Image (cartoon, rainbow, N blue to C red):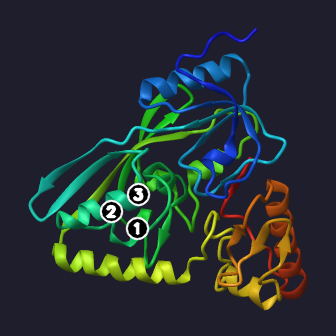
């Protein structure tokens, strides 16, 4: 019999509640740790009972297969942040559960530049650090100084160089793919900011927000499904393959942006994954290019 967990846990939690796709199966166990100590205790509990563990953010790029996840899914929720000013620059220390876009807006309003590119970026600081999130000419690697990482039961400080960033990936993301291992968790990050004009920063972010709204299909989605191959656009490749509007169940490849798959009602994870497979197969067949997922499938 499994001993009680160290923090409150929900059993058989429908993960459609925690995915921007509003689809997917249930987690055997689900928890929301709010401190490094709680995260360490959860990891130890999962290790003790040989449960697979998946750390997630706010589900903005997450899909759990319809059969469900047989272990523990945990969403880290600590959100505190503080700024240490150093003349015309500053160091921002922020916990990984903070929403990236909301943080960027508050900093811009205070006159701090560095994260304005993250206007409208879904997800948390932890997710951005984990996968080198970026958009509109900026990315995490450009401003990150270091990150606090939970490795097994030890908290380590990793400088930027150790994260070995590349396009939408990192050493952490590669380590997460090791079968049977407790995956690493981003607990906090430190970013370098510079002083800027609040009015100009907010105006620039307003333009980004308008552009993002124009390009983003309405409905439940997890944003870009595939990474852009070198020198190519995944969305344009899918569009050129003639797949805009292709539908399986209630899932559809968006007629507005072909790298989005939208849940138009009650799509299952299987519906979404069927469209993923169709897009991959057709792009490979027609252009000889293999698309790589940007979203996480559990």
Mark identifier at residue 22: none
Q: In x, y percent, where is residue 82?
A: 23, 46
Q: In this view, does 158 lie to the left or right of 73?
A: left
For marks 1 and 3, the one nearer the N-term is 3
Mark 2 — residue? 104
Name the residue rendered at 68%, 68% in the picture.
225
Mark 3 — residue? 100
Cα separation, mark 2 vs mark 1, equals: 6 Å
The crowding category of the residue bearing disc 3, from other C-alpha atoms within 10 Å (few below 14, some 14 to 19, many at least 20), is: many
- Looking at this rendering, what residue extends furthest in the bottom direction? 240
Q: SS at mark 2?
A: helix
Q: SS at mark 3?
A: helix
Q: Is residue 287 left or right of residue 256?
A: right
Mark identifier at residue 118: 1
Name the residue rendered at 45%, 78% in the picture.
136
* Numbered-mark total: 3
Tell me whether circle 1 and circle 3 mark residues in contact (CB < 8 Å).
yes
Cα separation, mark 3 vs mark 2, equals: 6 Å
Tell me whether circle 3 and circle 2 mark residues in contact (CB < 8 Å).
yes
Seen from the viewer's position, the closer of residues 161 and 274 is 274
The crowding category of the residue bearing disc 2, from other C-alpha atoms within 10 Å (few below 14, some 14 to 19, many at least 20), is: many
Tell me whether circle 2 and circle 1 mark residues in contact (CB < 8 Å).
yes
Seen from the viewer's position, the closer of residues 52 and 260 is 260
Q: In x, y percent, where is residue 33?
A: 49, 30
Name the residue rendered at 68%, 43% in the picture.
15
Relative vertical location of residue 16 with respect to residue 223 in this rendering, above or below = above
The crowding category of the residue bearing disc 1, from other C-alpha atoms within 10 Å (few below 14, some 14 to 19, many at least 20), is: many
Q: In x, y percent, where is residue 180?
A: 74, 33
Cα separation, mark 1 vs mark 3, equals: 7 Å
- Locate the N terminus by quadrant: top right
């Amino acid at each position: 019999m499994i001993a009680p967990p160290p923090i409150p846990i929900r059993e058989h939690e429908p993960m459609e509640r925690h995915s921007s796709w509003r689809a997917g199966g249930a987690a055997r166990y689900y928890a929301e740790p709010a401190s490094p100590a709680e995260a360490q205790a959860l990891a130890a509990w999962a290790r003790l009972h040989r449960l697979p563990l998946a750390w997630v953010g706010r589900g903005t790029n997450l899909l759990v297969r319809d059969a469900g996840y047989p272990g523990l899914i945990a969403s880290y929720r600590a959100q505190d942040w503080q700024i240490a000013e150093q003349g015309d620059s500053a160091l921002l220390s922020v916990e990984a559960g903070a929403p990236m876009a909301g943080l960027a807006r508050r900093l811009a309003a205070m006159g701090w530049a560095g994260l304005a590119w993250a206007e409208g970026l879904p997800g948390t600081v932890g997710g951005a650090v984990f996968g080198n999130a970026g958009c509109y000419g900026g990315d995490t690697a450009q401003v990150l100084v270091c990150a606090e990482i939970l490795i097994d039961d030890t908290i380590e400080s990793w400088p930027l160089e150790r994260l070995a960033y590349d396009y939408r990936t990192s050493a952490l993301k590669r380590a997460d793919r090791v079968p049977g291992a407790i995956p690493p968790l981003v607990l906090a990050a430190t970013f370098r900011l510079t002083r800027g004009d609040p009015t100009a920063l907010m105006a620039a972010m307003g333009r980004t927000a308008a552009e993002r709204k124009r390009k983003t299909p309405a409905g439940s989605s997890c944003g870009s499904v595939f990474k852009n191959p070198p020198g190519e656009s995944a969305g344009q490749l899918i569009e050129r393959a003639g797949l805009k509007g292709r539908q399986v169940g209630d899932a559809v490849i968006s007629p507005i942006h072909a790298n989005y798959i939208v849940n138009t009602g009650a799509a299952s994870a299987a519906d979404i994954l069927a469209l993923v497979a169709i897009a991959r197969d057709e792009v490979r067949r027609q252009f000889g290019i293999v698309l790589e997922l940007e979203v996480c499938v559990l």
